[in-house]
Image (tube, rainbow, N blue to C red):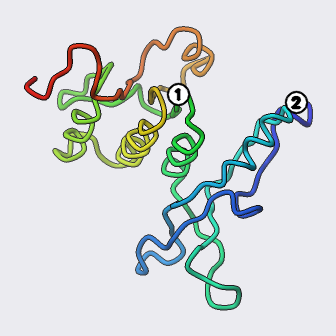
C-alpha cells in the first residue's frame, strides 16, 4: 500500500466523532451524536482513504473532569458517518451470510419496517442488532445498506460489481410499497 491508500485516523483528533456516555453503568462507552465530516471531506478530496477507529470525544466532559474519550460501537459509528456524509451505500462485512429469518435462511431484501420487526421479535439478535440499527440510521441520508459475508473471497469487490448475496435494507418507499402491505 502507498501512504495514501490507508491512513489510520483517530476520530478524537479534530473531534471527528463526538459522543455522549451511553449508560453510566457501562463506564466509558458512548454513542456518537455528531460527526465532523469536514475533516473526512478534506481527506477524501486529497486522495486519502481514512480508516477510522470507533472512539469518540466525550461532549459532556471538560478536561480534568472525566474521560475525554469514549469507546463507541463500530457499527454505530459507521452508520453515523455514512448518514452524515450522505454515502451512496453502507456495507457491513460480517462473519455470516446476511440477516436470517426464523428458519435460518438469508433474507435478500428488507424494508426498514421489516428489519425493525426482526429485531423486535428477537429473530435478529446479538451483533446483528447494532448493524441493523446503524444501517437504518444511515438510510436517513444513504441510498442503501448491505450486510454481506466478509469471509467470502473478494466479498467487497463482488458487492461493488454485482451486489449479490447478503441482505439489503432499503427505504420503505420502494416502488409498489404501501403501508397496507
Q: Nearer the viewer, residue 172 or 103?
A: 172
Mark 1, residue position: 89
Q: Quadrant of the N terminus?
A: top right
Residue 55 place in picture, x, y as percent:
63, 61
Mark 2, residue position: 1
Helix, strand or loop at mark 2: loop
Determine the CA span between mark 2 and mark 1: 24 Å
Residue 139 place in picture, x, y as percent:
42, 36
Question: Within 10 angstroms of label 2, few (less than 14), some, or many (20 or more) residues?
Answer: few
Name the image quarter holding residue 69.
Answer: bottom right
- What residue is at 91 percent from the left and 37 percent from the top? 3
On screen, residue 136 above or below 67: above
Q: Nearer the viewer, residue 38 or 56?
A: 38
On screen, residue 65 above or below 162: below
Helix, strand or loop at mark 1: strand
Nearest to viewer (mark 2 / mark 1): 1
- What residue is at 19 percent from the left and 40 percent from the top? 117
Return the disc, 2 or 1, that comes first in the chain's sequence. Answer: 2
On screen, residue 27 above or below 100: below
- What residue is at 21 percent from the left and 14 percent from the top? 176
Amino acid at each position: 500500500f502507498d501512504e495514501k491508500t490507508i491512513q489510520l485516523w483517530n476520530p478524537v483528533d479534530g473531534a471527528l466523532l463526538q459522543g455522549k456516555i451511553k449508560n453510566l453503568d457501562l463506564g466509558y462507552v458512548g454513542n456518537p451524536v455528531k460527526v465532523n465530516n469536514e475533516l473526512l471531506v478534506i481527506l477524501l478530496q486529497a486522495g486519502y482513504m481514512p480508516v477510522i477507529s470507533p472512539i469518540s470525544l466525550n461532549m459532556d466532559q471538560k478536561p480534568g473532569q472525566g474521560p475525554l474519550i469514549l469507546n463507541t460501537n463500530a457499527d454505530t459509528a459507521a452508520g453515523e458517518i455514512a448518514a452524515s456524509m450522505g454515502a451512496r451505500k453502507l456495507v457491513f462485512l460480517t462473519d455470516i451470510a446476511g440477516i436470517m429469518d426464523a428458519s435460518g435462511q438469508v433474507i435478500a431484501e428488507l424494508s426498514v419496517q421489516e428489519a425493525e420487526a426482526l429485531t423486535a421479535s428477537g429473530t435478529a439478535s446479538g451483533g446483528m442488532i447494532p448493524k441493523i440499527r446503524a444501517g437504518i440510521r444511515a438510510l436517513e441520508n444513504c441510498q442503501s445498506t448491505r450486510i454481506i459475508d466478509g469471509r467470502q473471497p473478494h466479498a467487497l469487490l463482488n458487492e461493488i460489481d454485482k451486489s449479490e448475496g447478503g441482505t439489503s435494507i432499503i427505504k420503505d418507499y420502494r416502488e409498489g410499497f404501501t403501508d397496507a402491505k
